[in-house]
Amino acid sequence: MRKSKLLYVLGCFAAVLAGCSKEAALKTSNVSIAVRKQHNFAVQATGTSNTNGFRGINWADPNGNDANNRVVQPSGLAPGMSATAAATVATNISNALKQSGGTTIRMPINPWTPIDSTYWPVYQSAINAIVSNGCKVILCYWPVGVHHVPDTTQWKGMWQRVDKVYKNNSSVLYEPINEPVDYNSTDLCNLYANFLATFNPAAGKCVLDGTGYAADVTAVGADSRLTAQYLAIHCYWWFWGSFNVWSTYYNNMSSRVGSYAARTIATELGVETYRNVGFWWQWDTGVFVDQAFLTGSLAYAKDNSMGSIAWSGVNDIDTYRWYVSHSNLTEVSPGAANMFRWSWQLTAVPVWQGPIADGRYQIKNRASGLMLDNLGNTSDGSTVGQWQSSTSNNQKWNISYTAGNYTLSCENANGCLDVGTNTTDGSNVLHFAVDTNKTQRWSIVDAGSGYYKIVNLQTGKCLDTGGNTANGSSVQQWYSNSSYNQQWSFIAQ
């Protein structure tokens, strides 16, 4: 992924894995027929019936993988560091990835990296440490400022140096070019065929990007000269359009993969993990576009046993990243990571870092016995109150954890619990559209006996009824104390 593309856009887990009505609805006869057709084709091509073994993250250069006249430096690597230090960084990252359920790290390569006599051994040390730790590496070439190979001689020279080291290492794969937008399908297939003729790689050694921004693999998949290699698709909602229901993205991905799912790896599939919305199990119509996208695209990948590699993973400044940083390998959004784990068909219990798992809840006050309710208000700045328990969406709150704190958004209109500019004891708590402000970020603190305090990140004050017990009375914020007015229970919906 390039930064310029962003500018262009300006519950029991085991039971889930066993199947659900939503997923069953996906499995139409057409999908089943396509999967059966793919099976024999994929075994002949790559020696495997699916790509689910490729599960992972991108390890990217925060200054851009399209490094111009310099070596690529994924976060944590730098010229001048020792090979031992590079191996340590890579081992830590691959350990974290394995704990997250992954197997594969995609890394950039450019012409300047393997010709740098001091940095190339460092870069190899990182690659080798990942492989020694039982993971796979996909090396991908990023052209500078264009979407084609600007200098074929330089490009082949780069790959010759890489191939000299890794030709016989089946755990290191080659992705000849990232997002080859500038080629039509004929020229792109010819580029790949020439690459294969030059390097004579083993079956399954290469991962070939689809046409455009690697957004469609059908033309490359259909070329008989390329059948021994994997295909790569890149998946972002802003490639496919803005929709608020998961099934649209499911179908969109299906059309772009065609009959080649068993050969295809989503080498980039990403959402902004720092967007402060919940990505876990978003099946409703009317959800945020990136929630619908992640659910639909990963549901398709799961149904077809396709591997997926999150964009990004380790990149210390990217808002799409999986981990906080290369030195703080904590998942930014466990909800998003759990969706990948679900798609990877893992049977582990979902990972949650905070005291409350992502999900939908009624939130009940201990003192009043009433539920947190947005009172039917949907406009920014409207007050939030409490009401006796009902089935209304006004009382259903989507709780999502991101990087240490929670966002609480109401099912009615998706507005978030927010203090606005209010800072004083007794001031009202409000309802605003989701953003990244601290005013709508909250910690949830165990108060014992099944109750929790909900503490605002901006003010440090607690969600409190103010002693009000009537339906429709507003909720407020107060300094932390032992009052039951600021103790809440979470009732899963």
Image (cartoon, grey):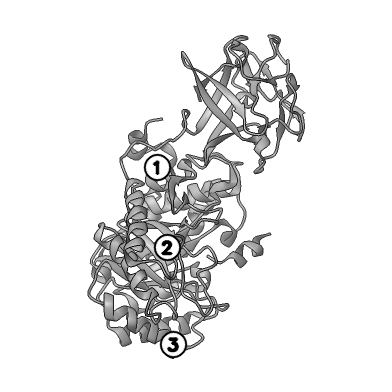
Badge 1: how crowded within 10 Å, few (<14), some, or many (20+)? few
What residue type is disc 3 on? Gln
170 horizontally vs 316: left or right: left
Q: CA distance from mark 3 to mark 1?
A: 50 Å
* Residue 355 seen in the current view: yes
Q: Is residue 397 above or below residue 50?
A: above
The mark closer to the camera, 2 or 1, is 2
Which one is in front in this view, the residue at disc 3 or the one at disc 1?
3
Which of the two labelled residues, at mark 3 and mark 1, occupies the earlier sequence position?
1
According to the picture, the residue beneath numbered tag 3 turns out to be 154
**Residue underneath mark 1:** 24
Image spot of residue 159 (x, y percent): 36, 81
Give the labeled residue for mark 2: 267
Which quarter of the figure has residue 267?
A: bottom left
Q: x, y (%) of residue 426?
A: 74, 19
For the residue labelled by badge 2, is the local secondary structure a helix, a strand or a loop? strand
Q: Which comes sooner in the sequence, label 3 or label 2?
A: 3
**Mark 2 or mark 1: whose residue is earlier in sequence:** 1
Q: How far is disc 3 from disc 2 in space, using C-alphas?
A: 24 Å
Q: Are marks 3 and 1 in contact (CB under 8 Å)?
A: no
Label 3: which secondary element: helix
**Amino acid type indicated by mark 1:** Ala
Q: Is 459 rendered above or below residue 52?
A: above
- Please report the residue visible at 48 percent of the width from the left and 79 percent of the height from the top: 185
Q: Quadrant of residue 427?
A: top right
**At numbered mark 1, what does the secondary structure look like: helix, strand or loop?**
helix
Q: Is residue 244 visible?
A: no
The image shows residue 68 at horizontal and vertical percentages of: 54, 78
For the residues labelled 2 and 1, the Cα–Cα distance comes to 26 Å
For the point 35% across and 61% down, which residue is it?
Answer: 85
